[in-house]
Amino acid sequence: MKPTLWSFSDSYVDLIRSGFEQIMADENFGPAEYEGLTDIEFPDRATLHAYLRDMYDYLFGDAPEQPMPPD
């Protein structure tokens, strides 16, 4: 996923980064909202936000592997 994202224009990458930052800061964004966008279920807000932080670190930081959502 990371190589694909970074193959797009800088403005698109910045848009995705901004979107991640917005949903991570949004107190009202939780498992139901994420499931509505992705069809991936999370058991609770804490698990979802940990996953989003890990994904952000993978895409925009130095995390070596893409995190996997819970089963």
Image: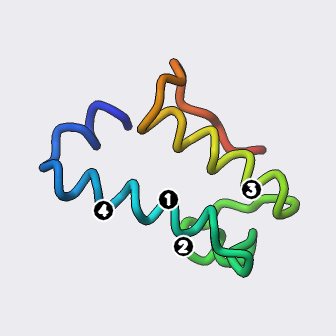
Q: Nearer the viewer, mark 2 or mark 3?
A: 3
Q: CA distance from mark 1 to mark 2?
A: 13 Å
Q: Amino acid at mark 4?
A: Leu
Q: CA distance from mark 1 to mark 4?
A: 9 Å
Q: CA distance from mark 2 to mark 4?
A: 17 Å
Q: Earlier in the sequence, mark 1 or mark 4?
A: 4
Q: Which circle marks residue 48 in the picture?
A: 3
What residue sits right under mark 4 in the picture? 15
Q: Earlier in the sequence, mark 1 or mark 2?
A: 1
Q: Residue 50, position in %: x, y?
A: 74, 46
Q: Amino acid at mark 2?
A: Leu
Identify which residue is drawn at 68% across, 46% down: 51
Q: Earlier in the sequence, mark 2 or mark 4?
A: 4
Q: Nearer the viewer, mark 3 or mark 1?
A: 1
Local secondary structure at mark 4: helix
Q: CA distance from mark 4 to mark 3?
A: 21 Å
Identify which residue is drawn at 17% across, 38% down: 7
What residue sits right under mark 1 in the picture? 20
Q: Amino acid at mark 3?
A: Leu
Specify the quadrant that holds the N terminus.
top left
What residue sits right under mark 2 in the picture? 37
Instruction: Name the colouring of the figure.
Output: rainbow
Q: Nearer the viewer, residue 67 or 38?
A: 67
Q: Residue 18, position in %: x, y?
A: 40, 62
Q: Residue 57, position in %: x, y?
A: 54, 35
Local secondary structure at mark 3: helix
